[in-house]
């Protein structure tokens, strides 16, 4: 159940080669959300922390965290070979090979030991349906974290079909228009949202975090339909 439903190798919402150009245009506050995630980690982690980055993609947060603290050890996990190939190039460009390692696969595939001082999931869980899959995804991460460690979750959130969500969509369309996203691409993105993204209300986010064993949740980020929460295990 923790497996992705959108495959970033076979049928990506944005091709891996386009991801780094498109993500900052399409996702409200893309760079800010990573910057703020780093600040959350810096405020909570020891100098020599061991960090699990779930859904590392093309390596945006791997590079940010690696440069944020040269003593942190970081493992980026992702099932997509294409996304990780780009991440690997970036790791080398930034001379972070000693500090940042990659694993192609899922959190479930990692050793079942609680060794991480922090974990992050940025723009990943919204691809998993709320049919037990989201909870299993969170539990699998929690299981590998030390007690009192920090977890960062960043996801598109909200309840499809509600007036509030419809309102957010109309704002997003204006946001995309302002950023020069062509009409055809906007339609494609909204179709992906309709068919392959499973946002949930903030109430449900908090409930799932609690069921997975997290507490003391704070929301540290909101960018239109993207929310960011920090919780402690
Ligand atoms: C939208 S990208 C986000 C990448 C990066 N975190 C960022 O902020 O740009 C989502 C990534 O999550 C990966 N993914 C999808 N399902 C996953 C799962 N169940 N576990 C780990 N990674 C997953 C995809 O392969 C993809 O690289």
Image (spheres, rainbow, N blue to C red):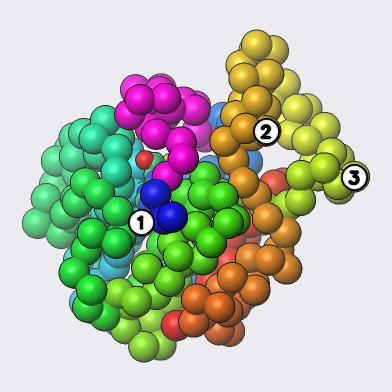
Taking the magenta stretch, the answer to whether it contains residue 8 is yes
Q: In this view, does 127 lie above or below 10?
A: below
Left/right placement of residue 6 relative to residue 118 reads right
Q: Nearer the viewer, mark 2 or mark 3?
A: 2
Q: Earlier in the sequence, mark 2 or mark 1?
A: 1
**Mark 3 and mark 1: span between their CA atoms?**
32 Å
- For the residue with label 1, is its CB less than 8 Å from the closest atom of ligand 1? yes
Name the residue at 38% across, 81% down: 149
Segment colored magenta: 4-24
Left/right placement of residue 34 relative to residue 176 reads left
- For the residue with label 3, is its CB less than 8 Å from the closest atom of ligand 1? no
Q: Where is residue 24 drawn, in percent x and y?
A: 52, 34
Taking the magenta stretch, the answer to whether it contains residue 12 is yes
Q: Mark 3 points at which residue?
A: 163
> Which quadrant of the view contains residue 70?
bottom left
Name the residue at 47% across, 49% down: 124
For the residue carrying disc 3, how many other residues have a C-alpha within 10 Å: few (<14), some (14-19), or many (20+)?
few
Mark number displayed over residue 54? 1
């Amino acid at each position: 159940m923790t497996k992705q439903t959108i495959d970033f190798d076979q049928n990506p919402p944005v091709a891996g080669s386009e991801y780094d150009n498109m993500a900052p245009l399409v996702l409200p506050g893309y760079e800010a959300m990573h910057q703020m995630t780093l600040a959350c980690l810096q405020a909570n982690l020891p100098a020599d922390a061991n960090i699990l980055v779930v859904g590392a993609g093309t390596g945006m947060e791997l590079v940010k965290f690696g440069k944020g603290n040269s003593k942190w050890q970081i493992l980026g996990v992702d099932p997509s070979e294409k996304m990780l190939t780009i991440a690997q190039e970036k790791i080398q460009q930034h001379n972070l090979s000693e500090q940042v390692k990659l694993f192609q696969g899922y959190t479930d595939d990692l050793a079942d030991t609680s060794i991480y001082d922090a974990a992050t999931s940025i723009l990943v869980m919204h691809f998993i349906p709320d049919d037990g899959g989201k909870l299993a995804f969170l539990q699998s991460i929690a299981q590998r974290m030390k007690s009192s460690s920090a977890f960062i979750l960043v996801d598109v959130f909200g309840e499809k079909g509600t007036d509030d969500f419809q309102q957010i969509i109309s704002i997003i369309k204006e946001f995309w228009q302002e950023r020069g996203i062509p009409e055809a691409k906007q339609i494609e993105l909204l179709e992906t949202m309709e068919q392959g993204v499973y946002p949930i209300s903030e109430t449900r986010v908090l409930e799932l975090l609690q069921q997975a064993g997290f507490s003391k949740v704070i929301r540290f980020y909101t960018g239109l339909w993207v929310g960011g929460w920090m919780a402690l295990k």
